[in-house]
């Protein structure tokens, strides 16, 4: 295929996108994808509270049981970009439904696992299935919705991401409390089965098929290069608790070199007129994509690790049960859920400024909670910190959803899967860094001071540093938009919706 032929294909695909007709079932279909997305993201954190019970019941070592969590996160991240590209090239609906079926079967296998080896293998397969589902979620939203409706849909999607990440310890603790007994942890996996079966049945009826654009080529060498690069970055992080960061730090250099080769290959394929696995123009031409990916990655470094640190503080420092520990951070989840839904209706009006406000709220809320939990008496500190966590949650609700919307809004629908996969890969890498670094810092300070309050305060300050960097990047993008608006004399909506950014793709 020549470059001119590729350009003609782009124009034909663009014409298809312009001929958008709203699907009357789109809102019902959205809820199917959100339920599946909630299950897949919840399973990143929900298992953490059950690890001591799993270790005891199956006679596993600490290193083996850690793979129940880290193995899922690893295969989840490895699949995202490839799955997104396959969805763009083939049929998002079919890939979503197949992946959902595999996820349900693996959930049942996890619950029935007789030993730690089979549990880890089932979790690796479950994470792979979740990685194939995740990019189809955001791509289907872009396919089914346009304009202000897309902002509202991404608002619900952002609420799902925020709530699933923050409520994992709460839901896990509640299931363990209800499923009383030595094998109660198995219901953490079994609960996915009836919900997943219902989602599959509804998805077959409601989800739209992908319009074929004649772009079925998938860059297999690119898949291998990207997979090796992501694996090299992720593996030391998922092995952090067993000393992986120290022993395997050289893999970061290997990963950087492999990803550099991957980027070079993608540019060569684009120059030859062949569809790359991940189009480099997403980062250089699509307005706001590169900045939004950076904002999301930095935010998730702080956001994801915070919940593990809180769990360590409440369960080991204050001797809370898993359920009590989860309930202590519930104000954040409640604030985040409400704000995320509202933010979807405001993003068209305020744009990137909404993310700036949200990050400021998270930093103020978590910062205040950190100070209260550090200096207030331990008997009263959790109650005093609850309002601050609620404020932080409201801020968080104005971060994830608007950032996803602003990052993906100018991405052509034919590239939506790969773009969503790359965005979520950054978020998964950020989450892996946060969940490895923040608990590690917590234990390091605890070992020197033997003071849980000091350890929590130090770890939360590190999380706030990552979020402050994310805020600086979001503020830069917002100020750049203001300058562009002043130069062209357009309102924010006209600048944001200008088609010039997507025509070149």
Image (spheres, rainbow, N blue to C red):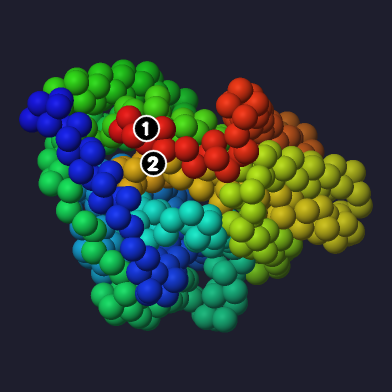
Question: What residue sits 50% from the left and 33% below the top?
Answer: 288
Residue 23, position in %: x, y? 35, 69
Compared with residue 491, is residue 102 higher up or lower down, i.e. above or below? Answer: below
Compared with residue 271, is residue 135 higher up or lower down, i.e. above or below? Answer: below
Query: Which of the pair 339/131 is nearer the observer?
Result: 339
Q: Earlier in the sequence, mark 1 or mark 2?
A: 1
Question: What residue sits 90% from the left and 44% below the top?
Answer: 375
Which quadrant would residue 378 be assigned to in this image? bottom right
Mark linked to residue 282: 1
Q: Residues within 10 Å of mark 1 (few under 14, many from 20)?
A: many
Question: What residue sits 42% from the left and 38% below the top?
Answer: 499
Query: Which of the pair 361/60 is nearer the observer?
Result: 361
Q: Which residue is mark 2?
A: 411
Relative to 317, 102 lies left or right:
left
Residue 281, position in %: x, y? 34, 28
Residue 263, position in %: x, y? 29, 23
Identify the image quadrant of the C terminus: top left
Query: Which of the pair 339/64 is nearer the observer?
Result: 339
């Amino acid at each position: 295929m020549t470059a001119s032929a590729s350009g003609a294909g782009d124009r034909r695909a663009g014409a298809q996108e312009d001929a958008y007709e709203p699907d009357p079932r789109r809102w019902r279909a959205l809820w199917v994808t959100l339920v599946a997305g909630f299950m897949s993201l919840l399973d990143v954190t929900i298992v953490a509270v059950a690890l001591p019970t799993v270790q005891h019941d199956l006679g596993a070592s600490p290193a083996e049981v850690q793979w129940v969590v880290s193995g899922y996160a690893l295969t989840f991240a490895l699949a995202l970009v490839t799955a997104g590209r396959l969805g763009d090239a083939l049929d998002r609906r079919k890939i979503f439904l197949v992946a959902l079926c595999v996820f349900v079967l693996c959930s049942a296998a996890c619950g029935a696992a007789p030993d730690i080896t089979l549990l880890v293998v089932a979790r690796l397969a479950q994470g792979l299935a979740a990685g194939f589902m995740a990019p189809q979620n955001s791509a289907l939203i872009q396919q089914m919705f346009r304009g202000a409706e897309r902002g509202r849909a991404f608002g619900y999607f952002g609420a799902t991401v925020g709530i699933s990440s923050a409520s994992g310890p709460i839901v896990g603790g509640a299931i363990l409390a209800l499923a009383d007994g030595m094998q109660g942890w198995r219901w953490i996996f079994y609960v996915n089965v009836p919900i997943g079966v219902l989602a599959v049945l509804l998805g077959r009826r409601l989800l739209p098929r992908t319009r074929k654009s004649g772009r079925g080529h998938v860059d297999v060498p690119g898949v291998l290069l990207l997979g090796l690069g992501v694996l090299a970055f992720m593996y030391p992080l998922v092995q952090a608790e067993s000393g992986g960061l120290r022993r395997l730090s050289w893999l970061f250099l290997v990963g950087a070199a492999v990803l550099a080769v991957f980027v070079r290959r993608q540019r060569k394929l684009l120059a030859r007129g062949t569809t790359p696995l991940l189009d480099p123009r997403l980062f250089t031409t699509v307005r706001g994509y590169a900045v939004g990916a950076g904002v999301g990655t930095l935010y998730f470094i702080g956001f994801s690790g915070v919940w593990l640190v809180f769990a360590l503080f409440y369960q080991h420092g204050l001797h809370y049960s898993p359920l009590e520990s989860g309930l202590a951070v519930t104000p954040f989840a409640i604030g985040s859920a409400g704000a995320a839904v509202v933010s979807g209706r405001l993003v068209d009006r305020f744009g990137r400024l909404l993310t700036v406000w949200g990050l400021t709220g998270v930093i103020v809320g978590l910062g205040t909670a950190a100070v209260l939990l550090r200096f207030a008496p331990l008997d009263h500190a959790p109650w005093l910190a609850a309002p601050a966590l609620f404020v932080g949650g409201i801020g968080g609700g104005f971060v994830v959803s608007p950032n996803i919307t602003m990052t993906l809004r100018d991405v052509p629908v034919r590239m939506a899967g790969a773009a969503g996969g790359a965005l979520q890969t950054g978020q998964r890498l950020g989450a892996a860094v946060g969940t490895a670094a923040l608990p590690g810092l917590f234990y390091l300070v605890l070992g020197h001071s033997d003071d849980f309050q000091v350890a929590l305060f130090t770890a939360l300050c590190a999380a706030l540093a990552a979020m402050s960097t994310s805020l600086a990047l979001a503020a830069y993008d917002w100020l750049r938009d203001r300058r562009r608006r002043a130069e062209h004399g357009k309102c924010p909506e006209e600048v944001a919706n200008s088609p010039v950014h997507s025509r070149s793709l």
